[in-house]
Amino acid sequence: MSQQILTIGQINEYIRAKLDSDVLLSGVAVRGEISNYKIYPSGHHYFTLKDENSALKCVMFRGNAMRLKFRPENGMKVIAVGKISVYPRDGAYQLYCSTLTTDGVGDLHTAFEQLKAKLHKEGLFSPEHKKPLPPIPEKICIITSEAGAAVHDMLRIMAARFPLTKVLLLPVRVQGSEAPGEIVSAIHYANQYKLADVLIVGRGGGSIEDLWAFNDEQVARAIFASEIPVISAVGHEPDVTISDYVADVRAATPSNAAELVVPDQNSLRQSMDKSYQLMISVLSRKLQSERRQLNILKSSSALQGPTQYVHRQRQQLHLLTAKLISASQQIVSKKKQDFIAKTAKLDAMSPLKVISRGYAVVEADDGDLISSIKQTGVGNNIQVFLTDGTIHSTVTEILEGSL
Amino acid sequence: MSSKPKSFEENMQRLESIVRTMERGEASLDESLKLFREGTALVEACSKLLDDAELQIGKIVAGADGEPAEEAFRNDSND
């Protein structure tokens, strides 16, 4: 007769059992737009998915929410996967969401855009913070995988361009969940021990998931905080990662990084050749100009002067010499006359002349002059000098008394 | 640690400075000759440094105390 009257608990429990036993509802994927997104202190996420006509309450428990690759926001179009059940307490059915992914664009892309906006707002990409690269680095540290073509390509190119440098490899994982932590540690380590003048951080090409470590927030912050300038070198030319925005210089690829980090020795040599040619041309211009100046000077009277001066001086010298000669000749002739006169007097007084007047010079044997009878004795030999000869005689007698 | 690239860079800078001075044309012939000789010597030195150079490559590993130590790293092109 009567309808069974149930308690609220009973009816809700009935509905729950019905829903839980439904195969479709135990694992369903639903597309909709997020609204009323709230995160509770418990860590559970509550939101409503809606489209034009309908709405569905959702809950994502903390454990599942932690695995979210992006931050769900109101208005986002998503695909929620989970099971539909009833929460008996309030009699509402909801989607117990296990995974949430962005619809259409891809959650990785969304995460990328969110982080890019956030860090840009904080100023991490601003040009004022970018440090210049050393033009000729002494040491370069590459943070990348030690396997793979990237590091070998870089080394090959650096060796060809500019072997006069030292390259240190700090090997890290470049994909997978451990990669961001290793890359961050490597950047800190290089800074702590001042391993190089410049860092290259990167990897070879791959999918967006492969490159994902270089979109990691901690990696970006480590690059920003690095006191050593950082070149980011991730993937192929069209791949742009957060690391590329925050680095001091972005290289399109690892090989490009090798070209940016060291100069090319060929162009250095060319520039040296040019310098050399410039020096030669300056020098030869200078020599030519000096030579011209020299020629000008040569033909000018200023330089002719000395020759003439010398000539004049020479003439003067001749003149003076002539005067000197004639003057001295006059002196000489006067002196000569005096001399002759004096000589004549002397001549007259000369013993020879006296002798010629009849006087004689008497000497002893030994040549001593005898001017007194006392200077000799009887029997001594004496020599008598007359004007025309000498007489040897012997003293026979000595008589006193003057002439 | 290696002082060669540093002196290479210094040499290049000194060479540029010499060329700039000479181009100004104010130096005497004697000074210009001196600068030319110095500049030529620098060009020869830098060229020789490049000719003789071989890229030095090392791999950093953290020692037991955490300090960096260097190991050999061969640059093979095999993956």
Image: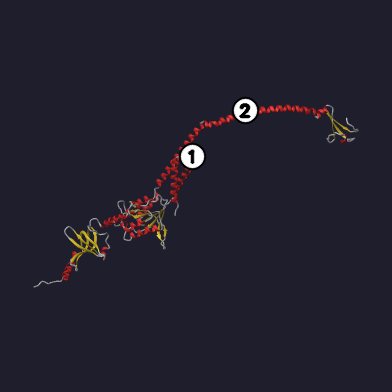
The colour scheme used here is secondary structure
Spatial CA span between label 1 and label 2: 45 Å
Name the residue at 43% across, 47% down.
B13
Mark 2 neighbour class, 10 Å CA radius: few under 14, some 14 to 19, many 20 or more: few
At x 40% / y 47%, what residue is drawn? A265
Label 1 environment density (alpha carbons within 10 Å; few <14, some 14–19, many ≥20): some
Residue A310 visible? The answer is yes
Which is in the foreground here, disc 1 or disc 2? 2
- Residue A351: x and y, percent? 81, 30
Circle number at residue B68: none
Q: Which mark is residue B29?
A: 1
Where does the image place residue A327, in percent across and percent down from the top left? 67, 28
Q: Is residue A113 left or right of residue A152?
A: left
Residue toward you, A164 or A193: A193
Q: Chain of mark 2?
A: A
Q: Amino acid at mark 2?
A: Leu
Label 2: which residue?
A319
Residue A248 is at least partly visible in this image: no
Closer-to-camera residue (A28/B25): B25
Amino acid identity at mark 1: Leu
Rendering coords of residue B33 (x, y %): 48, 41
Q: Secondary structure at mark 2?
A: helix
